Image (cartoon, rainbow, N blue to C red):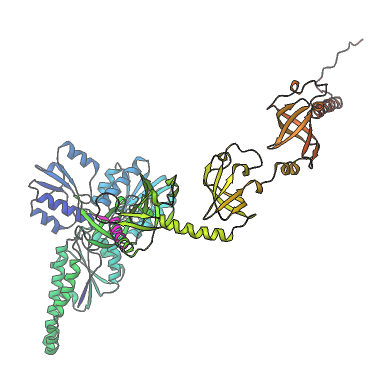
Amino acid sequence: MQFILAKRAGFCSGVKKAFQITEDASQSGSRWSTLGPLVHNHDVVRYFQARGIATVESLPDIAEGGVIIRSHGVTPAILVEAKEKDIPVLDATCPLVKRVQELAELLSNEGYDIIIFGDRKHPEVRGLLGWCAEKATVVANLEEACSYPNVKRLGIISQTTKDEQEFFRIAAHLLPKAQEVRVFNTTCAATRQRQEAARELSREVDLMLVIGDRNSSNTKTLVQECQQTGVRTLWIQSAADIEAQEFSEVSKVGITAGASTPDWIIKEVLNKMAEFEVGALQEQNQVNQEQENQLLENNAPEENFARMEAEMADLASPNRGDIVKGIVIQVTDDEVMVDVGGKSEGIIPLREMSFKDVHSAKDLVEIGDELEVLVLKWDDDGTILLSKKKVDSKRAMDKLEEDFKEGRLVDGTIVGSVKGGLLVDVGVVAFLPASHVEDGYVKDLDEYIGKNFKFNIIEFNRHKKRGSQIVLSRKQLVEGERTKQKEEFWAKIEEGQTVKGRVKRIVDYGAFIDLGGFEGLLHVSEMDHVRVSHPSAILKEGDEIDVYILALDRDKQRVSLSRKKLLKSPWEIVVEKYKEGDIIDGKVVRIAPFGAFVEIEPGVDGLVHISQLANRRVEKPQDVVSVNQPVKVKILSIDTQEKRIGLSIKEVVAEAEQDEVQEFLEKQDQEVLEPDSKAILPQTEDF
């Protein structure tokens, strides 16, 4: 007969936490009592009773000492009562149950009608009702959910030990019953995984043994899950419940245990099963002595039990400093829960997930991901604290040390700036001095943040206590790249070409343009057709622009550039944009004895002759206009050869007056054709 232990069985992390807190309390020298059974397992309760931990049903039953809140949690009223009575409290509530309590309180405070999927008499559910002011409705199954009335706002939560799929079915049925529904899947991932492991094992064996207390809700669910696969299932509380005749025609037995079943009970069952196997072999040996000798020589029962003992050894929790593999079973914004084997779950706080600045663990991992983690410590509350960041850091440091020794380049992302340089993510955070960012001075280091580059490692010391353990450089790489780019640049550049460039530096007399390996000068006089007061008036560092190769000096390696050559001249713009007879806006820019010059486009002025300033005789132009005065002008002529434009203000005024007169006449004609129907006619006397 072969027996197989389920991959996940026995104490969950919440029960381990409660057990550890109570174990410590029993050794503290003070008197403590648990409020109700610590967990739903009589053997655990008896274990602590033998160590002086009593079980009470209410706070008034405590004559001396403090109270331990069991893993199922309590109502807030009990916590208040303990404080008022000055009773010390050790809270062994399962962290997942605490989370459900918080959600129940949140939904209650926000005015939701609340449904709890669970058993009304279960202590966890009784506690949850207290956290939502006793205003929730408890449903035990889909039939009860069907009778729930329609409401405006509905919140749905679950007892942690209930079946997840049944919870989903109930939630789906309740969705149409409210205008707004909030559903929180609060079923326990550890419980869910135990159920999945039990189902998988049930399909491989002839008989399933489920070990757990008759009052344990999660054990009851395990039994139901196994039975639903069709396999014969026995629910036992201890090894004493095992009867030999149950295994007379069984060749393979599966064994699992509820989350509140202690390891020693599971081991006792394994011992008993091994005894049955020895008995079966002895009976067989009486029939066939030769077969008996062979089996006894091979130590089959001992080997089988040794294998089971090895599996049970996995129940031991990992120790501080161990690096173990685990599977992600739950992810929130602030932490990740990981099954690290040994039937244990640990917590990775967000700060231990990555050295990168992240706002949610959901951005880093998903349920089902396999992680390598370092066991940091057991918290006072029994929680295993883990770190992914430290394992990643060690792996990265090992690789970087090898890269440093071999002189290999490393890839990295610049993630921040500090005094004197930049921080680079190369698997761990390394330092890039400002003098090694480029092959020259860098004005603004922040421009590099978020960019990816290759680096040389110029210093590596993993045992360095102060300063950076890893120092990087790009200087030689940039110098080599610049040299290569410069050679390629001079090989293909010619006068008259139009190329793209990036504004590298701006000076009073122009701007230096990076042409991809070489810088050329764009003089201020070549920036535009109009006068430029300062290069910064039209360009800024980092701008990408097209430039014209004006001149090359290969001996001195100088490149003169022009932007003006690629721009339309103001006269070209005027010719395309305007025609004779157009009335346009302009500005008086200077006055001469013979008239006024009006700017109609930047760089293009037209002349309003003194005779065209007004429809009267003008002695001096300044009697009519002044410098910087905006005016409307009519284009009288455009001489593209001489680049002259004749303008008139007088014509604009005349046309405006003519339009005004025409509008008046049209309005008058309209009034004649359509007299006011409301006018009062003079009355006449009737002779």
The residue lying furthest to the front in this view is 555
Going by the image, does 163 lie left or right of 56? Answer: right
Task: Work out which quarter of the rendered image holds the N terminus and state it.
Answer: bottom left
Would you place residue 277 above or below residue 326 in this image?
below
Q: Is residue 578 visible?
A: yes
Residue 300, above or below 469: below
- Image check: 630 left or right of 537? right
Q: Is residue 641 left or right of residue 490?
A: right
Which contiguous range is marked in magenta?
Answer: 385-399
Q: Residue at x 9, y 53 (%)?
A: 49
- The answer to whether one can see residue 37 in this image is no
Residue 577 sits inside the magenta stretch: no
Nearer-the-camera pick, 628 or 363 = 628
**Residue pictured at 33% horizontal, 63% vertical:** 403
Q: Position of residue 174 (x, y in %)?
A: 40, 52
* Image x and y of residue 223, in percent: 25, 65
- 595, 178: nearer the viewer: 595
